[in-house]
């Protein structure tokens, strides 16, 4: 029995069934009209018809009337939009979200298999990086990252071909595909590079620790030189060491090594920042073995104008708009906050110093205490 026939044969059941519909659906009647229809129908019906509405149904109708009253009250305090037909909206609207609805997408089951099978084999079934962050961990991380990036790359290329056949502009296509292009953003690329550098640093630290334990057997106990790598110029001097009875004056030594040019960069810093930055460029074995609390490092960077903000996960972005790097105003660099213990170990601190030296020309000599 269709709704028209039900309306003629049993108006009460028709009204109650209509009340179960969503209030915003255009094909349904307004609940206020249905309540008025029900009241008029019961008032003009006999006792047998009115008896069909028992106490339980009256309570349900009362609750429904209260919900309707609340909905109307809320809507009276909000702007009212005119209901429009979806086909008319697609034809009249020129925004990206509506333009996409008129674009025929050719993505089918075959395309799903072509892109999904490699993802399943190389991502879901691939061994995850776990345990120590060594070369095996790094290789597995790169493999599953590449599998995921290839999956989204295939989607971008497929949808771009479909979008280029539509009325979408090049900029609009780029904006739409941005949601599946996170791996192409500079922030993502730099964060991956930082993570890989951190793993390589850990590998290097492990090898340095092994060599250092062997070196203790033959290093003289009275030596207090830095554990940092010896410059090539000093290695050559030691290889060409003069006999013990030959003495080299300070003037002769300077003529061999040449004058040392001072860095023109000079950054006045506070005492707390000075103590942190000098540890990034150690000159003694004691300094080379010290780490720094993460909060102290953030405060030190703040003292020289770097503002820290969270970049997602452990990524922290340090920005300084007043710096001039490579001829461009402003500077930005990404570091990872150590976890679970928020402390930067000595090896990571030296690596951070090298990166600051590469991008911002920092060195130990450029920091001076504020007067």
Image: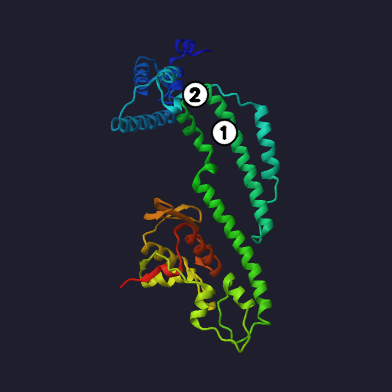
- Residue 128's place in the image compared with 170, above or below, is below
- Colouring method of the image: rainbow
Q: Crowdedness of circle 1 by 10 Å Cα count: few (<14), some, many (20+)?
A: some
Q: Is residue 12 above or below residue 332?
A: above
Which residue ends up furthest to the bottom in the rendered image? 245
Q: Quadrant of residue 57?
A: top left
Q: Is residue 338 left or right of residue 129?
A: left
How far is mark 2 from mark 1, CA to CA? Answer: 17 Å
When the figure is inspected, residue 286 is found, relative to residue 52, above or below; the finding is below
**Element marked by disc 2:** helix
Helix, strand or loop under label 1: helix
Q: Residue at x 43, y 17 (%)?
A: 91
Q: Position of residue 365 (x, y in %)?
A: 43, 70
Q: Is residue 164 above or below residue 130?
A: above
The residue indicated by pointer 2 is 101
Q: x, y percentage for residue 160?
A: 55, 29
Residue at numbered disc 1: 156
In the displayed orientation, state which residue is furthest to the left: 77
- In percent of width and height, residue 80 lies at 31, 27
CA neighbours of label 2 inside 10 A, class few (<14), some (14 to 19), many (20+): few
Examine the image and state in which quarter residue 197 appears.
Answer: bottom right
């Amino acid at each position: 029995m269709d709704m028209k026939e039900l309306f003629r044969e049993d108006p009460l059941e028709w009204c109650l069934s209509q009340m179960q519909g969503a209030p915003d659906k255009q094909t349904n009647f307004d609940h206020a009209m249905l309540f008025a229809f029900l009241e008029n129908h019961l008032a003009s019906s006999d006792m047998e018809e009115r008896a069909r509405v028992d106490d339980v149904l009256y309570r349900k109708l009362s609750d429904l009337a209260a919900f309707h009253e609340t909905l109307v009250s809320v809507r009276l305090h909000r702007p009212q939009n005119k209901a429009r037909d979806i086909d008319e909206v697609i034809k009249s609207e020129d925004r990206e979200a509506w333009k996409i609805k008129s674009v025929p997408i050719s993505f089918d089951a075959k395309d799903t298999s072509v892109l999904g099978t490699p993802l399943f084999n190389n991502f879901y079934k691939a061994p995850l990086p776990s345990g120590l962050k060594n070369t095996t961990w790094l290789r597995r991380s790169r493999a599953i990252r590449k599998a995921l990036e290839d999956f989204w790359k295939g989607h971008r290329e497929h949808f771009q071909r479909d979008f280029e056949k539509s009325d979408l502009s090049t900029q609009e296509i780029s904006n739409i595909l941005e949601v599946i292009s996170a791996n192409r953003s500079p922030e993502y690329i730099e964060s991956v590079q930082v993570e890989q550098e951190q793993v390589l640093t850990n590998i290097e630290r492990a090898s340095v620790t092994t060599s250092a334990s062997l070196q203790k057997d033959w290093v003289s106990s009275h030596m207090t030189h830095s554990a940092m790598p010896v410059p090539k110029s000093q290695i050559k001097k030691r290889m060409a060491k003069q006999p013990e009875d030959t003495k080299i004056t300070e003037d002769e030594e300077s003529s061999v090594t040449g004058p040392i040019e001072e860095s023109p960069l000079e950054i006045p810093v506070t005492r707390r920042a000075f103590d942190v930055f000098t540890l990034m460029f150690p000159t003694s074995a004691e300094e080379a073995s010290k780490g720094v609390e993460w909060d102290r490092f953030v405060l030190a960077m703040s003292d020289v104008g770097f503002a820290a903000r969270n970049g997602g996960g452990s990524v922290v972005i340090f920005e300084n708009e007043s710096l001039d790097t490579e001829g461009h105003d402003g500077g930005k660099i990404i570091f990872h906050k150590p976890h679970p213990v928020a402390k930067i170990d000595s090896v990571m601190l030296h690596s951070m110093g090298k990166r600051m030296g590469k991008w911002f020309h920092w060195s130990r000599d450029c920091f001076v205490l504020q007067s």
